[in-house]
Image: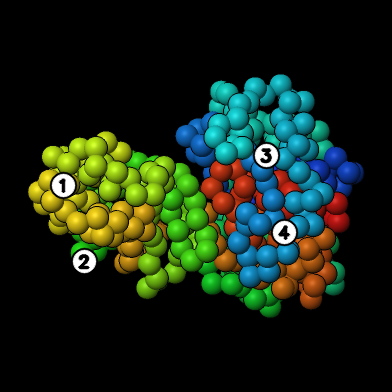
Amino acid sequence: MPSQSDPYDAIVLGAGGAGLMCAAVAGQRGKRVLVIDHADQPGKKILISGGGRCNFTNIHCAPDRFLSANPHFAKSALGRYTPTDFLALVERHGIAWHEKTLGQLFCDQSARQIVAMLLAECEAGGVVIRLNHGITAVTHADGLFTVAHGGSVARAPALVIATGGPAIPKIGATGFAYDLARQFGLKVVEPRPALVPLTLGGEDLLFRSLSGVSTPVIARHGKTAFREAALLTHRGLSGPAILQISSYWRHGSAISLDFLPDAPAGWLVQAKGSKPRASVTSALRGHLPDRLADALAERLALPGDLGNIPDRKLEEAQRRLSAWDFTPNGTEGFAKAEVTIGGISTAELSSQTTEARRVPGLYAVGEAVDVTGWLGGYNFQWAWASGWAAAQAL
């Protein structure tokens, strides 16, 4: 291990997924690497992900499943370090896994196995990890970065920003990466919560009374659509479909939900033909949870038997049910967001190496960068791939 007076080859700020991956790969390439984190344990976001089982990648990973001001930026790293590559690492460590829906891969047992795997890889590369070390200053002079941390000072010609974004502050997440980037003159795309529940107000308050009801929907915003479950909460809307669409939603815009994604065209008129004495409420109860069916029927305001309701009114009701508009008044913020959208501008970085174009030796990886994946293991794959790409260049 290098002494304190010896410069490391690289200092990685952040012991999360991207930082540990970068450090392990660089260490095994013969680089002397130091990882510094203010947290008391590594990989905190990994540990809480996937209900404690870590949705560590997605086999359907592709660049079009990531949001960024530059949609092409992620292609290089994602193309060179794939879900298959990470899965091979998982299997080499004997970690049992399973695929859930939509290509999502999880540990059979515990997310702790992924953290242990990354730490073992770091150990194999001789990486030094210092936890509980708050960073008090970072400077750059004469080709060396100097990091003051926890009463110590470390120097290296390369510095990797892997401190993530401000999502989930209760585990210690902050906007430190952005402050550091700005210190070195790098632009930051305004960060906002992503994969986050949406809040409702006004006319949509009715749905708050349905807290706990979940149903499959297609959530749409513009040309983007996700088919998964939506969950009605006491504050608004959540569930996988809503978390997905939240990354695309902007204040003031509407989202629409198709509450009947499997219903054939004209099904309400057909129901009228087969059960003319039934009500809209009972027809909806055949497709939806009772409480939701009752609330939607009340809003449609078509009382009486189906047989007495004109076909055009039923067709109009079905159209509304397949594109029910909500205009959220906000989100539940970084406290409930799974990730951050925005971050260090990709225009400042090399897509091949993640190195800052104007600050040689400075790199940024993972969630600190303006690359945000869909729900379902995509953000972890970006962490692995971007960390690996930076490690190749260190």
- Tell me which residue sits at (52%, 60%) in the image: 224
From mark 3 to mark 1, how far is it between C-alphas? 49 Å
From mark 1 to mark 2, how far is it between C-alphas? 33 Å
Label 4 secondary element: loop
From mark 4 to mark 1, how far is it between C-alphas? 56 Å
Question: Residue at label 3?
Answer: 59
Question: Residue at label 4?
Answer: 74
Dot 2 or dot 4: first in sequence order is 4
Dot 4 or dot 3: first in sequence order is 3
Bin the neighbour count of mark 4 within 10 Å (Cα to Cα): few under 14, some 14-19, many 20 and up. Answer: many
Label 2 secondary element: helix
Dot 4 or dot 1: first in sequence order is 4
Mark 3 or mark 1: which is in front?
A: 1
* Depth check, front residue: 228 or 131: 228
Q: Quadrant of the C terminus?
A: bottom right
What percent of the width, then of the height, locates residue 179? 59, 70
Mark 2 and mark 3 in contact? Answer it, CB < 8 Å: no
Residue 202 is labelled as 2
- Tell me which residue sits at (68%, 78%) in the image: 185
What percent of the width, then of the height, locates residue 99? 60, 30
- Tell me which amino acid carries mark 4: Ala
- Tell me which amino acid carries mark 3: Ile
Q: Residue furthest left?
A: 304
Asked whether the viewer can see residue 72, the reply is: yes
Bin the neighbour count of mark 3 within 10 Å (Cα to Cα): few under 14, some 14-19, many 20 and up. Answer: some
